[in-house]
Image: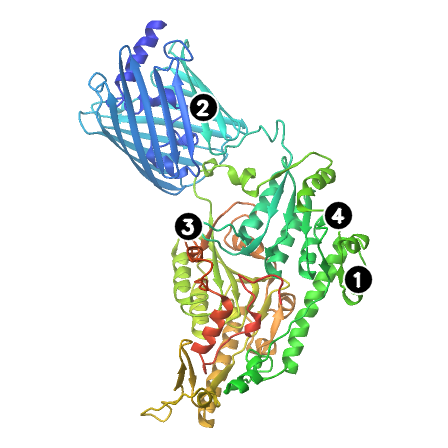
Amino acid sequence: MKKFSIILLFILFSASVLAQTYYSQMDFSLTSPGALKFGLYGYDNPALLTSITHPDIYFTWSDINGRWNDFNRWGLFTAIPNVGFGMIHSKLGQFSVNDYRISLGLGDRSAGFGLSWGWSRGDTKYFERTNVLTVGTLFRPSRHFSLGLVGYLPTKGDGKEGVLDVGYRPLGNEFVTIFGDFAFQKNITIKNLPWSAGLVVEALPGIRLTGRYFDTKTFSVGIQLSLGRIGFSTQGFFDQDRNHSYNTYGIRIGSYDRTMFGTWIIPEKQYLSFNLNGQVKYQRYKFFDKSSTLLDLINYIKMAKTDQENILGIAINTSGMIVNREMLWEIREQLKIFKSSGKKVVIFVDRPNIDMYHFASVADKIVMDPQGMLTMEGYIMGRTFMKGLLAKLGLGYDEWRYFKYKSANENLSRDRMSDADREQRQKIIDRYYELSKSEICSARKISEEKFDEYVNNKFLFSPADALAEGLIDTIARWEAVKDIFTALCNNKVKPADPGNITDKKISASNEWGEKPAIAVIYAIGACAMDDGIEARSLSKVIENVVNDKKIKGIVLRVDSPGGDAMASDYVAEAIRKCQGKKPVIVSQGYVAASGGYWISMYADKIVAAPTTITGSIGVIGGWLYNAGMKDTLGFSTDYVKIGKHADIGFGFTIPYLNLSVPDRNMTEDEKIIIEKNIKEMYRSFVVKVANGRKKSVSEIENIAEGRVWSGLDGIENGLVDVLGGLDRAIDLTKELAGIPVTEDVKIIEYPEKGLFDFNILIPRFLPIQVKDDPVLQHIKLRLENNGKPMPIMPIDEIEISDHIYPPR
């Protein structure tokens, strides 16, 4: 037996880059490279580095000399995403050598490619070492099958070798994996090629049993145990007579791996703790941005719902939360679904108004700061009118309005709302009130009459008053929520960071192959060619996504008040070209009206929240011109021209502001031409919507004329198909793409957000910002398009992605 071990030891030590390049490492591998997690972190197949998502390190050693603490042969392997490093130390008598290998891998979970470079230090001549280039590929076209191809190319000698390894998961998951491999070597017939085959069984999370048989009639049996971020492994090797030869041992530290410890064994009871101070946005910068995103919050809540063993509930701190009411509704809906699993929700508030209280009412317990205040003020939509200001400045404004409800320019041409604008705005806030009353009364078990009394007669509540009325449950600071949760769950629980929940931490290597992909494309801001939604580039993004075979469907998130008709049509046409190729679902955010509805109209389905502002199918124009300002400021202008209307936009430019004001109003003849263009654009808009929504022109005209609608009304009049948020839109996209709703998908967000916000580089004392402000964008857009027909909403409706709470 001892003689066999010595012979085996010599073979392992002397064959690292010659004929046995691949199998000389097998004492450190429980399986072939692609069958179990990361193999040897790129040392065996560098293409495996594409599966690594977090830093990891693995130390392993052999007791081939008969002692478990004998470190004559050991290996150290480590990796970060796409980069790996490994070394194997070998000692035989007085001679020793260290073999190093650095590896790079690129690709995704369905296909990867990698290169590594190996070199040695020590008694290289004794062990016949030479540098070696390794080329590896990994193909995982589905969750059932894995194929790896590796070529070992020494820079000297004749030890070239190719290796094929295959894996098969009959159940499509990690529970059972069948694997095999064999090596192609020069001057060895296929019949005599070395090979191995085996099985991995993971009957319990993180406990993996392995067995492997070699062509030499030897075999190994191993076990791998995961404790989360730490793991242990050992395997025993047996000779052809089934006699035990030696063991290898391993310790892994780094990325989180599934485990039954802390879940099935000694489960750790937790609640997710969300501190939402700051903005809730659609996307955040890759670095130095701690903002929450809507999609992340939705996914965290969904994952917490499925964690049946550990996560007992969710606590949310709303202090300092900056968010619009549509996003609040979406998050509230997710919390309702979360509660349906029997889990608890606690929400902390300090100075909530009716929108934030509506959101908080979903909680099992509402906790209010001792120095807080609750206002149940109702809803209001108001406008600031600038007709008088323009007159005092010496500016005239001519409103070109031909459709009853298209009120975008009223604030420049009037000193109060028109009856039509008052009518449509009142209907929207009536809907807001109905929704909040219904859901607050249902959640807090109060009558609708009581709710009306709170709004109309009391409206402001101290913490003591709110507690006495049953509007809140506890007066305390955020720090007390832990004890409140313990009492609520009758179980000692501790807070957990959302980023640490199990599903978020487990490596992507759990499944083979790429998940079906859904693209979420954001159209946020004013409709403009190179600002706001950036229609020029956004249409290209849509086109590229349509041509990407890995992406099975598109969700277009629209949060836009409209603007330039050409910009809107660029995006709308890109969506229209998707028809029949991939499903497209539009998810409308806070405002998706006018030009924002234009880019929505060709979708297979339109999803909106009850509080979404949608519709406004209409076109309007206006003309800002000099009515004495030039003389007041002391400017004068002069010109030469050719063409009757060449001076139509000519005027004086205000220094520093770079604001050009036309000298004159349009003539009646010019207005007739403009009127014709506005009405033609309107007719085109109505026809396009009718085609996109598969309705008659008359049906659309009945709900058009520039009228805005709530999402609830949009369902009733056919402008919207489904009530819901971003998550509902993703589920609908999966359904239309033939993907089971319960199946996980990969969400790819476009356009990609930048690396970081450049504002952080500007000293705070300087009054400079490079951040795009949606209101400033809107003003700039109006001035750049002075006199042009536009499908656009009023400036006071720009409550979009970076909207500051509370909503106006």
Q: Earlier in the sequence, mark 2 or mark 3?
A: 2
List the single residue furthest toward the left: 157
The span from disc 4 to disc 3 (Cα, nearest Å) is: 50 Å
State the residue in front, 514 or 597. 597
Q: Residues within 10 Å of mark 3 (few under 14, many from 20)?
A: some
The span from disc 1 to disc 2 (Cα, nearest Å) is: 62 Å
Please give the residue where the numbered disc 2 appears in the rendered image.
Answer: 251
Q: Kindly state the secondary structure of the residue where label 4 is placed.
A: strand
Residue type, label 3: Lys
Q: Earlier in the sequence, mark 4 or mark 2?
A: 2
Please give the residue where the numbered disc 3 appears in the rendered image.
Answer: 550
For the question of whether residue 203 can be seen, the reply is yes
Q: Kindly state the secondary structure of the residue where label 3 is placed.
A: loop
* 259 over 654 or under it: above or below: above
Q: Nearer the viewer, mark 4 or mark 2?
A: 4
For the question of whether residue 343 can be seen, the reply is no
The span from disc 4 to disc 1 (Cα, nearest Å) is: 23 Å
Q: Nearer the viewer, mark 4 or mark 1?
A: 4
The span from disc 2 to disc 3 (Cα, nearest Å) is: 37 Å
Rendered-image quadrant of the N terminus: top left
Which quadrant of the structure image shows residue 83? top left
* 219 over 252 or under it: above or below: above
Q: Nearer the viewer, mark 3 or mark 1?
A: 1
Q: Kindly state the secondary structure of the residue where label 1 is placed.
A: helix
Q: Earlier in the sequence, mark 4 or mark 1?
A: 1
Q: Nearer the viewer, mark 2 or mark 3?
A: 2
Give residue 164's position: percent from left, percent from top: 32, 30
- Of the numbered discs in the image, which one, if any, rests on residue 494? none
